[in-house]
Amino acid sequence: MTKFLKPILLTLSIAIFSMGSATANDIKKSATIDMKKLFDEYHLTKDAQDKVKANQKIIATENNAKLDAIRQIADQIKALGKKIDDPVIAANTRNKLVRDRQLLANKGNALENNRREWLNRRNKAINENIVTEMRKILAQIQDKVEAYARDNDIDMIFDKSARGVTQTHFLIFSKDKFDITATLLETLNADAPKGE
């Protein structure tokens, strides 16, 4: 999930960083947050991750069933190969067994190609769903951050977890007293089901 998260968090960080066109003289109050922590510890993120894991488990079970069918065909091909190699077998019988083996090989190859295409489609669907869910969750987080900034008269909020192209932090230093991550986490998780 993190490979999809990085570009979205970077975009969101830049949006929050540039949340106004105020000059340095106009900025009266600023704060910091850890967007990665907000995302990771938001109860809806955990729910989305649980759904992804459940879907991956279903896919793995179905994939194993498809692989079992292919293995059974491979075993049948191997058994036919032993019969074909038997020196006492009649030529007509051997020719029929060779044809049967080829038909099984064709069937096995078709099943394997279908399995791979099916697996690619399912994985692509899961990945697209992950990106969609993450965007929704990040939009909700951003809405809460912006609402908090408006309600508390904060001019700018900086993301402590944001990194640049060189993987260095955008925000080099900030006192902990400016960090509003814990407060926003409480707000985000206020409607979480009990027991989480």
Image (cartoon, helix red, strand yellow):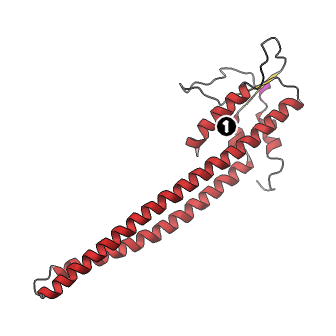
Q: Quadrant of residue 68?
A: bottom left
Q: Look at the image and tell me whether residue 160 can be seen.
A: no
Q: Is residue 30 above or below residue 58?
A: above
Tell me: 134 left or right of 82: right
Label 1: element kind: helix
- Residue 151 lies in the magenta stretch: no
Q: Is residue 93 above or below residue 157?
A: below
Task: State the image coordinates of residue 10 (x, y, percent, origin top left).
Answer: 63, 32
Q: Nearer the viewer, residue 29 or 130?
A: 130
Q: Residue at x 67, y 49 (%)?
A: 133
Q: Nearer the viewer, residue 12 or 95?
A: 95
Task: State the image coordinates of residue 21 (x, y, percent, origin top left).
Answer: 77, 19
Task: State the image coordinates of residue 9 (x, y, percent, origin top left).
Answer: 65, 36
Q: Residue at x 59, y 51 (%)?
A: 128
For label 1, count other residues whose C-alpha is less than 10 Å away and answer few (under 14), some (14-19) or many (20+): some
**Amino acid type of the residue tagged 1 in the rendering:** Lys
Tell me: 1 left or right of 31: left
Report the span colored magenta: 174-179
Q: Nearer the viewer, residue 6 or 112?
A: 112
Q: Is residue 17 above or below residue 109?
A: above
Q: Quadrant of residue 195?
A: bottom right
Q: Residue at x 76, y 34 (%)?
A: 181
- Residue 178 lies in the magenta stretch: yes
Number of numbered callouts drawn? 1
Q: Look at the image and tell me whether residue 44 can be seen.
A: yes
Task: State the image coordinates of residue 67 (x, y, percent, origin top left).
Answer: 41, 68
Q: Is residue 96 above or below residue 158?
A: below
Instruction: Return the residue at label 1.
Output: 36
Residue sticking out furthest to the left: 87
